[in-house]
Every structure is written in C-alpha cells, then in structure tokens.
Image (cartoon, grey):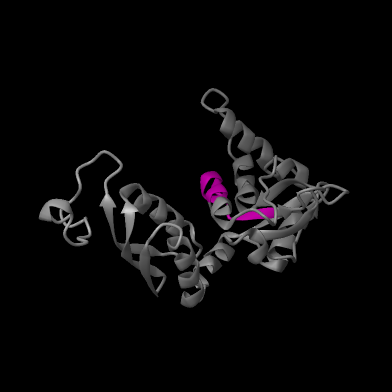
Amino acid sequence: MPMTVRDVMNRFVVAVEATASFSDVVTAMCRFHVGAVPVVDGDRQVIGMVSDDDLLLKDLDRRPADLIVEGPSRRRERRKASGHRAAQIMSSPAITVTEDTPLRQTACLMHRNGIKELPVVDGETGRITGLVKRSDLIRAFCRPPEDLRDDILEVASRYARHCAVRVEDGIVHLDGDVERRSQVRALMEEVWQADGVVDVDSSITYEIDDVGRAVPAGAIRRTGPAEGGQDR
C-alpha cells in the first residue's frame, strides 16, 4: 500500500486563533522554530495559514502605493501587509490534507502551490489533527531495500512470467520477460508508484508487440523452433 500522510505527519501542531495579533504569531513561530502556523476557529477547524512569507509582507506597508500599476495580486499582498490580526494576515482558504492522503498527492499539492507545510485535518469533522512538512515527505525514500524489493516482486508477478528484482540505493533493477509489449508499460508505471523508488533500470523483454510499432531488435525472447523450422 502507498505511504500516506499518517505515516510521516507531526501530531504536535502550533496553531493560532484568528484573533491572534501579529506579534503573537511571530512569537509562536520563533518559539517553536516553524515556518508557518495554521489559523483555527473556535472548533479547531483550519480557516487559513500564516507563513513567514506572509509576515515578511509587512515591509510592503512602508512603500508608497501606486494604484495605477498595482494588479490584484499586489493589492492583496498590501492588504495582508497592513493587517494586525492573524485573520487579516493569513492565506485563505487553507489547503489541507487528511491522514489518508497519499504522499505523492501531498507532494504534488505542495509543489503546485509553492508551500512547505500542510495542515492535516480529520476527514469528517475538519478539525486539525497534525501537520506535514516537505521534509517529512523524503522519509518515503528511507525504506529498507528488502521491503521495496518485496513490493516490486508483488507488482511484477501480475505482469511478468518471471522477473528478477534487485534494489540498490533505491534503484530498482528488473530482468525478466512478459508476453505483450503493453504489459511492459503497465509494469513500469506501477513500479514507479512504489514508495522509495529513486530510479528504474529495466531489462524486461516482450514477445508480442501489441501497441502497433515495430519490434526493436533483440526485444523478442527466442523460445526455440516454431512450425516450419523457423525460430520465433
């Protein structure tokens, strides 16, 4: 099973209420050495996030406004920069994940939105249960090689007639054969989905080209004489 947020999340969370002052937010982040804090309401539901980038916007408040050249993004930043409470400074709505969110999906969310931390919420109540950071996600690459090899062997057994699997430094080496070329593609896609895979070195061959392309030289496994005395 793919690793999920539950496997790597931090259950100790530093959060602030919407009414927290700018100084309270700064103090909390400095005291606990965090780069962002969730903003929660009275029911512990996440309504936004305040990051160190949001706090550093305060410097914008000292620059003269030029409403002719300012776009919507700059005006939004200026409004946040002039805020005195967490509700005014935060980025909202908050992007959240649940404990069951796969790590790959979590990584995509962080990358797509340019953020380093995500609040973890209960899927039913919406209440905060933890926090996951970018640095937590790399733990997926710390799996023992024998565990990763077992996962890959299970995947390979669904496609290959026989397959040898070797794992070194997260690199998966595959050597075997399948019946159809399309199965090579499907096998590789599943192998890449396994947590902890750094790279894949494949020597998988196929016998039947079912994707409508010419069979590459040497890709057909020779199995002995066929009818008429010719090799297949």
- How many numbered tags mark residues here? 0
Q: Residue at x 57, y 34 (%)?
A: 74
The magenta segment: 108-119
Q: Is residue 125 left or right of residue 172?
A: right
26 relative to 153, above or below:
above
Residue occupying the far right of the picture: 42
Residue 166: image location, x then y, percent: 37, 73
Q: Residue at x 23, y 41 (%)?
A: 213
Give whichever of 4, 56 is nearer the camera.
4
Residue 111 is one of the magenta-drawn residues: yes
Residue 60 is one of the magenta-drawn residues: no
Residue occupying the far top of the picture: 68
Residue 117: image location, x then y, percent: 62, 56
Residue occupying the far front of the picture: 228
Q: Is residue 4 left or right of residue 12?
A: left
From the image, which quarter does the N terminus lie in? bottom right
Residue 69: image location, x then y, percent: 51, 26
Q: Is residue 8 left or right of residue 202?
A: right
Residue 23: image location, x then y, percent: 75, 55
Quarter occupied by residue 232: bottom left
Q: Is residue 231 left or right of residue 191?
A: left
Q: Residue at x 14, y 56 (%)?
A: 231
Q: Residue at x 49, y 71 (%)?
A: 150
